[in-house]
Image: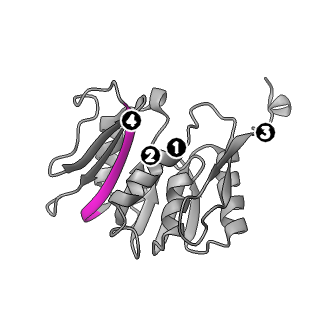
Amino acid sequence: MSKRQTRTPKNAGMVRIISGQYRGRRLPVLSVDGLRPTGDRVRETLFNWLQNEVPGARCLDAFAGTGALGFEAASRYAESVTLVEAHPSVAQALEQSRATLQADHVSVVQTRFEAYVASKPELFDVVFVDPPFHQTDFTDVLNGVQKVVAANASIYIECPKNLNDAEVLLPKGWEVQQDKIYGDVRARLCIAGALR
């Protein structure tokens, strides 16, 4: 397909923000390969785990997609939220959602996560890692995350339940605080140690 024939992805549905100042607001889900929003049930559990960590935190949604995790954190009074997204149309939809919500404490960065880490950004207190499952080496991604987490940061990892621990190797000093299976998805919450 030539550039002239390339079509802008269409909405495949919506995902709603569960709680906080943007509660009930909906975010578009574009029809893009690998885009898979975190379900309501998983997000509700995750933000119960993080209820004391998110308010006032610097948050990074490393593979933002719909922005469901990042905007949920923004809704729950994170100090700042950075949404990193490589796909141009998806990043544009995130920017439109940010503007619609008037979420001035949210920023959208259109780039690959590896390039973002290489730019040596600020360190984050909470990081969400929910990349496209079939395109991701989780160990490499988590080694990148290690470079942008503050001491004692919380890191949420969503991956296929059938990946073994060797395929999702945690950086040294990280401790698993929560580990649950939801259907085909494994949800884990880790804490980065004080020594990096």
Say if mark 4 contacts mark 1, CB within 8 Å: no
Front position in the image: 14 or 59:
14
Q: Residue at x 34, y 47 (%)?
A: 144
Give percent across and percent down for residue 13.
Answer: 71, 41
Rounded to the nearest angstrom, the CA distance separating label 4 from label 3 is 28 Å
Q: Residues within 10 Å of mark 1 (few under 14, many from 20)?
A: few
Vertical comparison of 37 with 20: above or below: above
- In the rendered structure, find residue 39 and report the number of the disc placed on it: 1
* Residue 126: quarter of image: bottom left
Give percent across and percent down for residue 135.
Answer: 47, 29
Tell me the residue that label 3 is attached to: 8
Tell me the residue that label 2 is attached to: 42
Front position in the image: 139 or 43:
43
Tell me the residue that label 4 is attached to: 159
Looking at the rendered image, the disc whose residue lies closer to the viewer, 2 or 3, is 2
Q: How would you classify the magenta stretch by its main secondary structure?
A: strand
Q: Which of the two labelled residues, at mark 1 and mark 3, occupies the earlier sequence position?
A: 3
Say if mark 1 contacts mark 3, CB within 8 Å: no
Q: Which of the two labelled residues, at mark 2 and mark 3, occupies the earlier sequence position?
A: 3
- In the rendered structure, find residue 55 and report the number of the disc placed on it: none
* Residue 142: quarter of image: top left
Rounded to the nearest angstrom, the CA distance separating label 1 from label 3 is 24 Å
Q: Residue at x 31, y 40 (%)?
A: 180
Q: Which of the two labelled residues, at mark 4 and mark 3, occupies the earlier sequence position?
A: 3
